[in-house]
Image (cartoon, helix red, strand yellow):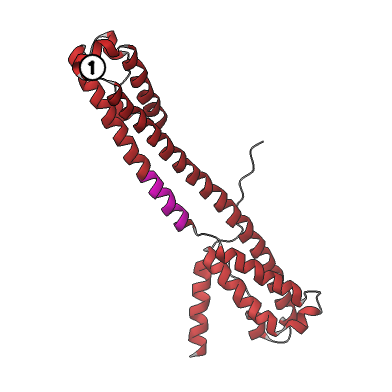
């Protein structure tokens, strides 16, 4: 069964979530005696902070995308090298057979530039296999084992580059899911902490109550910050 996609519970960047958690924890730690009355212990605050540290240390999506782009570029380079090796063989084959003959078409290199990665890899291996079957007839146009070994090597390099690129795609998917799961866990704990904080001060101290107010989006936070700055001036 396919695993269900996990949605983020918060509408602002991970960095802002982390910052909010640290800021609220710092305030709550100063008021820990009040929190103890709700069963929210100092140990729980320490566990919350430890989770924040783990979340902070996770690689960002920019890092993962960067790694993925690097491997994709290497895959493209390997693909072009394979195409060049294939064309080198087919230029010689065309000297021997008309490109409309069955012998030429058997190599299956039509639309080489439009092939998918899988098609290109299969094509490279097919060129080597078919050329070996006719190598005695193609020797006079320069097709030999050294030339075919070049295509085989290019196939191997391309396949390795393709696998590495796909691994990076998978690693990013896993990392995004892990970061989302941890971010949601942080957010839920943040809500719990802030709900307690608001309940503590709702009837006695408006300013302290506001310290525990959460905003639904990054834009809401910016607006609230600007209002706070104006009030403090």
Farthest residue to the left: give it.
95
Give x and y (percent) for residue 115. Answer: 35, 28
Q: In this picture, is 227 found above or below 117? A: below
SS assignment at label 1:
helix
Q: 227 above or below 58? A: below
Image quadrant assignment for residue 216: bottom right
* 46 falls in the magenta region: no
| Magenta residues (range) | 62-73
Instruction: From the viewer's side, name the closer residue of 174 and 211.
Output: 174
Q: Position of residue 158 (x, y in %)?
A: 38, 35
- Where is the N terminus found, in terms of image quarters? top right
Estimate the x, y position of residue 50 in percent, counting from the top left.
66, 69
Residue appearing at x 59%, y 51% in the figure: 177
- Name the residue carrying label 1: 93
Residue 66: in sight, yes or no? yes
Instruction: Choose top left, top right, bottom left or bottom right for residue 118.
Output: top left
Residue at the image point whose x is 39% and y is 26% from the top: 119
Q: Quadrant of residue 181?
A: bottom right
Q: Considering only vertical position in the picture, is 121 above or below 3?
A: above
> Is the magenta region chiefly helix, strand or loop?
helix
Viewer-proximal residue among 161 and 227: 161
Name the side, left or right, on which 124 lies relative to 10.
left
Residue 231, position in %: x, y? 52, 87
**Residue drawn at the location 23% of the way across and 17% of the way down:** 93
**Residue at coordinates 77% horizontally, 84% vertically from top-left?**
33
- 130 or 220, which is in the foreground? 130
- Crowding around mark 1 (Cα neighbors within 10 Å: few <14, some 14 to 19, many 20+) is many
Relative to 135, is 210 above or below? Answer: below
């Amino acid at each position: 069964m396919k695993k269900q996609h996990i949605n983020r519970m918060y509408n602002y960047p991970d960095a802002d979530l982390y910052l909010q958690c640290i800021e609220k924890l710092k305030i709550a730690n100063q008021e820990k005696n009040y929190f103890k009355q709700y069963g929210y212990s100092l140990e729980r605050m320490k566990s919350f902070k430890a989770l924040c540290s783990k979340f902070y240390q996770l690689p960002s999506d920019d890092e993962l995308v960067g790694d993925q782009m690097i491997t994709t570029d290497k895959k493209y380079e390997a693909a072009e090298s394979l195409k060049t090796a294939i064309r080198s063989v087919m230029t010689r084959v065309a000297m021997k057979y008309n490109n409309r003959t069955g012998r030429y078409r058997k190599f299956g290199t039509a639309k080489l530039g439009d092939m998918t990665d899988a098609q290109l890899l299969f094509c490279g291996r097919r060129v080597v296999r078919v050329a070996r079957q006719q190598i005695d007839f193609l020797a006079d146009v320069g097709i030999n084992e050294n030339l075919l070994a070049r295509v085989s090597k290019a196939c191997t390099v391309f396949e390795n580059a393709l696998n590495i690129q796909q691994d990076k795609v998978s690693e990013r998917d896993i990392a995004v899911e892990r970061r989302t799961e941890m971010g949601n866990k942080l957010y839920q704990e943040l809500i719990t902490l802030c709900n307690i904080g608001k309940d503590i001060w709702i009837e006695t101290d408006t300013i302290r109550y506001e310290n525990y107010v959460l905003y639904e989006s990054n834009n809401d936070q910016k607006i609230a910050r600007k209002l706070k700055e104006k009030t403090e001036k």
